[in-house]
Amino acid sequence: MLYQKLLINKNSYLIYVTEARNFQIHRHPEIELSFCLEGSYTIGVGNTRHRLQKGDLAVINSMVAHEAFQNESQVGRRLTIEFGPSFLKEHFSAVANLDFDIAVYHLQQADPLLPLLEEVAKLHQNPGNFSDLVLKGNLYHISARILQELLSCHTPDAAKQGVQEVTKIEQALGFIYDHYAESPDLDRVSQLCGYSKSHFCRVFKNITGDTFHNVLNRHRIEIACLYLKESNTSVESVALQVGFPDAKSFCRVFKKQTGTTPNQYRHAN
């Protein structure tokens, strides 16, 4: 499972306008909007797949594992917006605790959300004077409309993880992203979150669906794949750069996760 590092420093939201393409299963603490600008693509949440066509909007809740698919018959462009607690403030908690994983809206031509989303995509790609103010204003309008819709259609789920726990695990994931090459210690990361090691492991797995060490190694292999594709660095050097003690352990984990050896991966890419 792939985890993203998002909303660091002063960024309270993230925006992408990209060609729709396959994207590995991943999760993140932010609430994600996926808007189909052109063509079509498919989003998967659990065992359910949703095909989005032009004008469709998907809202994916915090820490929900999701992925994207595209084939030759589905060629499209997508606008992705991710909101964190620093943007939505107290409203983030209200949505994160709702009992939904994904909500899909088929926006009609007269829906006021359509021009707002389209303008966000345009301003993001071609910014001008004061466009950041217009863009942020649009994002507040969009989020307010979606919050109203979600709160009217869904109810709080007491079984959902609290925002405080999500925030602490986000902090742990951030530490992994920053220190993956330094062999981050489980004791140190659990202390960073203010948890005992055993409690941290339970909360981490409940929220992410995986163990600390699996997440750490998957992130390391993700970075290693970039090194292997984009440089001629030796396998031994790549192993050390991503935090493995030696090439043997690196190759073992690499093959377990990718189904191939580092050298085979490099030659195939």
Image (cartoon, rainbow, N blue to C red):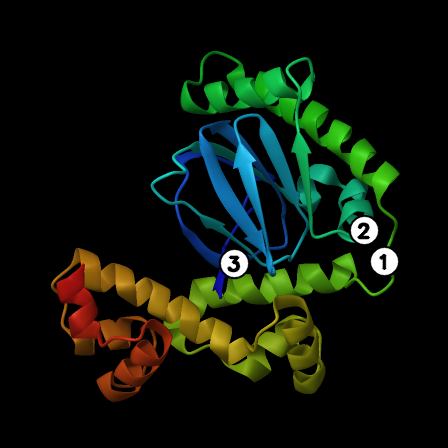
The label shown at residue 204 is none
Residue at 61% over, 71% down: 209
| Image location of residue 207, percent across then percent down | 67, 67
User: Along the horizontal axis of the image, is 43 left or right of 58?
Assistant: left
| Measured Cα–Cα span from mark 2 to mark 1 | 6 Å
Q: Nearer the viewer, residue 53 or 155?
A: 53
Q: Secondary structure at mark 2?
A: loop
The label shown at residue 157 is 1
**Residue 83 at least partly seen:** yes
Identify whether 73 is placed above or below 185: above
Residue contact between numbered discs 1 and 3, judged by CB atoms under 8 Å: no
Name which residue type carries label 1.
Asp
Residue at 69% over, 79% down: 202
Reading the image, the residue beneath label 3 is: 26
User: If you read the primary sequence from the N terminus, does the residue marked by circle 1 or circle 3 appear first?
Assistant: 3
Residue contact between numbered discs 2 and 1, judged by CB atoms under 8 Å: yes
Reading the image, the residue beneath label 2 is: 98
User: Along the horizontal axis of the image, is 82 left or right of 258?
Assistant: right
Q: Secondary structure at mark 1?
A: loop
| Image location of residue 184, percent across then percent down | 47, 77
Number of other residues with Cα within 10 Å of mark 3, as a class: few under 14, some 14 to 19, many 20 or more: some
User: If you read the primary sequence from the N terminus, does the residue marked by circle 2 or circle 1 appear first?
Assistant: 2
Name which residue type carries label 3.
His
User: If you read the primary sequence from the N terminus, does the residue marked by circle 2 or circle 3 appear first?
Assistant: 3
Quarter of the figure with residue 198: bottom right
Q: Nearer the viewer, residue 59 or 184?
A: 59
| Measured Cα–Cα span from mark 1 to mark 3 | 22 Å
